[in-house]
Image (tube, coloured by chain):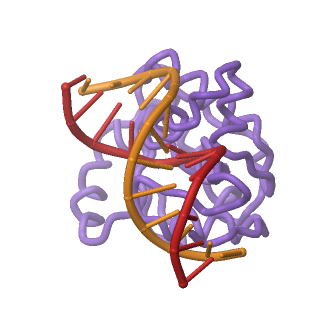
Chain colours: A purple, B red, C orange
Amino acid sequence: MKLIIETKEGDFTAHYSENGLSKLDFPTAGKTRAQIAAKETEVSPQVSHWHELTIRALQDALAGRQPRMLPPLDLSAGTDFQRRVWGALRRIAAGRTRSYAEVAAGLGQPKAARAVGSACGANPIPVLVPCHRVLAANHHLGGFSGDINWKRTLLAREDVEVVEG
DNA sequence: TAACATTCCGCGC
DNA sequence: GCGCGGAATGTTA
């Protein structure tokens, strides 16, 4: 089940499974019309309610605020390691950052910094699972799997200082 | 096995 | 200080 969320940044696409929000896509130019047409199938009250929560959470996150409430997240598509990383990311408050190495150390695997980067790239729910708050060593920007400008924008909204590089 | 959203160390400037 | 090259590193398809 896939539904659109219209924001000032463009139209996000939210995917729902039986268990909750399973995927969130950044706006992609040109796809809007087709996706809006696709949302017209019947929506259960359950999904409808989750979608309300997703919309509010996304709008808070885009404004740099910590969402009060999230919909249930269905992260079952990930591996064990990825789910551990994503869980650690959700404990980083808005406006705070960690390095890939710090996240790795928090999992008890201080040498897995690069693996943490890979797991961040596999994150199906960006913004709400704050993959953008993970920077390279000493506040260098580091990478991003999509448009690196999303990482810059989201961090700027949270008043985070970043070193380019 | 190869590909990474890393990090560290040793250079030369 | 900054940039670059190379090696070690864990996870994944």
Q: Is residue A148 above or below residue A8?
A: above
Where does residue C11 sit, x and y in percent of width and height?
45, 22
Residue A61: quarter of image: bottom right
Give A99 or A7, whichever is nearer the viewer: A99
Residue, x 69% and y 46% (percent of image)? A99
Give A76 or A86, whichever is nearer the viewer: A86
The quarter of the picture where the N terminus of chain A appears is: top left
Report the residue that reaches farthest toward the top: A80
Q: Is residue A21 above or below residue A27?
A: above
Give A70 or C9, whichever is nearer the viewer: C9
Q: Is residue A9 above or below residue A120?
A: below
Give A64 or A114, whichever is nearer the viewer: A114
Residue, x 80% and y 57% (percent of image)? A95
Residue, x 67% and y 37% (percent of image)? A89
The quarter of the picture where the C terminus of chain A appears is: bottom right
Q: Is residue A92 left or right of residue C7?
A: right
Numbered label tally: 0
Where does residue A115 sit, x and y in percent of width and height?
49, 32
Residue A4 visible to the viewer: no
Residue, x 60% and y 70% (percent of image)? A153
Q: Is residue A28 above or below residue A102?
A: below
Q: Is residue A115 left or right of residue A69?
A: left
Where does residue A138 sit, x and y in percent of width and height?
73, 57
Residue A127 visible to the viewer: yes
Where does residue A30 sit, x and y in percent of width and height?
24, 71
Residue A60: quarter of image: bottom right
